[in-house]
Amino acid sequence: MSTDRPRVLVVEDNFMNKVLVKEMLTLHGYEVIEAGTGKEAVELTSREAPDLILMDLHLPEMDGVTATRLIKEREELRMIPIVALTASAMKGDEETILSEGFDGYVPKPIELSKLLAVVGDALKRKDLGSGS
């Protein structure tokens, strides 16, 4: 059954962080699918084609930067915005993360207003890009 709710793939290996993000997004009208590793994220993205991916940087099997690079290399997946979720919140980290191919950045601990703003902006930019 199809839904009009935006589908967000949450890639997070920390159970509590995953539950928190899923709860925040679900309560605000998003459909959430989950992955616990970078490798799983690449496979799920190919199968599910989510509207947006929230990618932790530090993951088992394959880190978030490598997973993002593999997803962005695929022509049919390149337009999916990928937002980094990370505890690296030092000055200059955001620029470094964006230069790795991410479309946005949410620092941990995650604040609901920041998460919703970054997700909403990334989805708007995606819609504007596909509408031209």
Image (cartoon, rainbow, N blue to C red):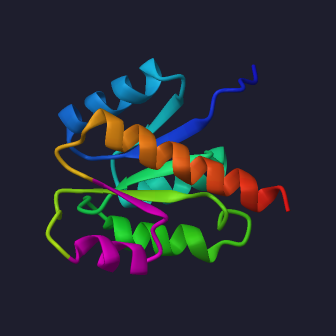
| Picture layout, residue 63 above or below residue 35 | below
Q: Quadrant of residue 62?
A: bottom left
- Asked if one can make out residue 44 in the rendered structure from this viewpoint, the answer is no
Q: Quadrant of residue 81?
A: bottom right
| Residue under the point 47% across and 23% down | 28
- Asked if one can make out residue 36 in the rendered structure from this viewpoint, the answer is yes
| Picture layout, residue 52 above or below residue 34 | below
| Residue under the point 30% across and 70% down | 94
| Residue under the point 34% across and 36% down | 113
| Residue under the point 31% across and 79% down | 96
**Stretch in magenta:** 92-106
Q: Position of residue 105 (x, y in %)?
A: 36, 59
| Picture layout, residue 104 above or below residue 115 | below
Q: Position of residue 86 (x, y in %)?
A: 24, 57
Quadrant (top left, top right, bottom left, bottom right) of the C terminus: bottom right
- Asked whether, in this view, residue 39 is left or right of residue 4, the answer is left
Q: Position of residue 10 (x, y in %)?
A: 41, 43
Is 99 in the magenta? yes
Q: Position of residue 100 (x, y in %)?
A: 41, 78
